[in-house]
Image (spheres, rainbow, N blue to C red):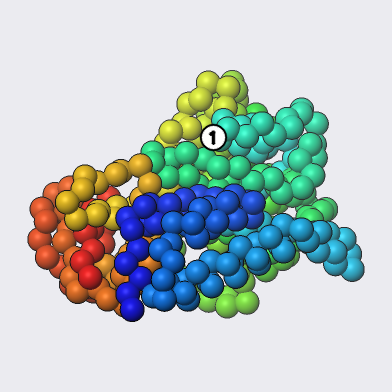
Amino acid sequence: MPANLPPQYFETEKKLKTAKTPEEKVSILEELLSIVPKHKGTEKLQALLKTKIAKLKSTAQKKPTVAKHGLSFNIDKAGAGQVVLIGLPNAGKSSLVKSLTNADPEIGDYPFTTRMPSPAMMQYENIQIQIIDTPPITPEYMEYWHAELIKGADGVLAILDLSSQNPASGLENLLAKLKEKRIELIPKNHTPSSEASFFQKITLVVANKADFSSSEENLAAVKKALHPDFDLIPVSTKTEDGLEILRTKIFSLLDVIRVYSKIPGKKTARTDPFTLKKGSTVMNLAKAVHKDFAQNLRFARIWSQNKYQGQKVNRDHILEDEDIIELHI
């Protein structure tokens, strides 16, 4: 027996993509459970929702995992992707997080103001991207969990301080410390290294404090020391110069597209797109919407900015950023 779920169910289900905490997810799942029609065709779905609610409630009640050498930090991904900020002491990571998001991290002109990883959400047009502030890395010390956090992220922002005496040398120190942990920062369009033992992570280099008098000279020195394929973005949290360019670069770094699911006969809501990896197909979208669509999809119609205006496409059609898709089952 088919589930025959109402459109309200799928609209509510979209909220799960931006929910940040187990408590928020439980609230949305309970709302979904109340919307599901109660008949034999939805028994499995009801059971699945109840199981998810139970698991999330159990997770929310658990205490942080304690390892032999202290607390273990694992930050669940949220939004369209997760980007970790790294840098030497006083590079201005927390100030940058405050400028890019609605978070209000502790900021000080002394080193190690940030002691633990701290997630926040950055708005980019109609999606959110998770930004994680982290403690500083020095030639002498790096938190034991820091490397795993970097490896698990979708991308890295390496923050440099243009007001410091020698930011180019600071960059070299940062890269050297990461190589001790078998991590190599690479630009987006980079041929993989022959050193297979290194964990490579796509990175943007952010030259912070570009409003200082010495910034132009220091920026030129950093460009000379940096591989030419790296994106080097000068910014100032004080004047806000470069911040919008940085937001766009962060979105590009993630290699994702925004796709809108259209209900037949309804207008397209462009406020809450699905975010999928570049190269995703109509079938990938169908799976993201609901398993019923993936199992029963017959065809789709597509609208795009420059090419399609409601034409039929098959399930293997490659999607592009801001495509509008109408799924038919």
100 with respect to 323 (left or right):
right
Residue 35: image location, x then y, percent: 44, 56
> Who is closer to the viewer here, 37 or 161?
37
Up the image or down, 123 lies above or below 240; here it is: below
Q: Quadrant of residue 76?
A: bottom right
Residue 281: image location, x then y, percent: 28, 68
Up the image or down, 144 lies above or below 210; here it is: below
Q: How many marks?
A: 1
Residue 165: image location, x then y, percent: 69, 33
Up the image or down, 280 lies above or below 206; here it is: below
Amino acid marked by disc 1: Leu
Q: Quadrant of the N terminus?
A: bottom left
**Can residue 224 be seen from the camera position used here?**
no
Residue at point 20% right, 66% down? Answer: 328
Residue at point 17% right, 51% down? Answer: 265
SS under mark 1: helix
Task: Bin the neighbour count of mark 1 within 10 Å (Cα to Cα): few under 14, some 14-19, many 20 and up.
Answer: many
Residue 215: image location, x then y, percent: 57, 28
Q: Quadrant of the C terminus?
A: bottom left
Residue at point 58% right, 46% down? Answer: 131
Most extreme residue toward the front, as rendered? 39
**Residue that numbered label 1 is attached to:** 100
**Can residue 268 be seen from the camera position used here?**
yes
Q: Quadrant of residue 161?
A: top right
220 with respect to 263 (left or right):
right
> Who is closer to the viewer here, 290 or 234?
290
> Who is closer to the viewer here, 22 or 200?
22
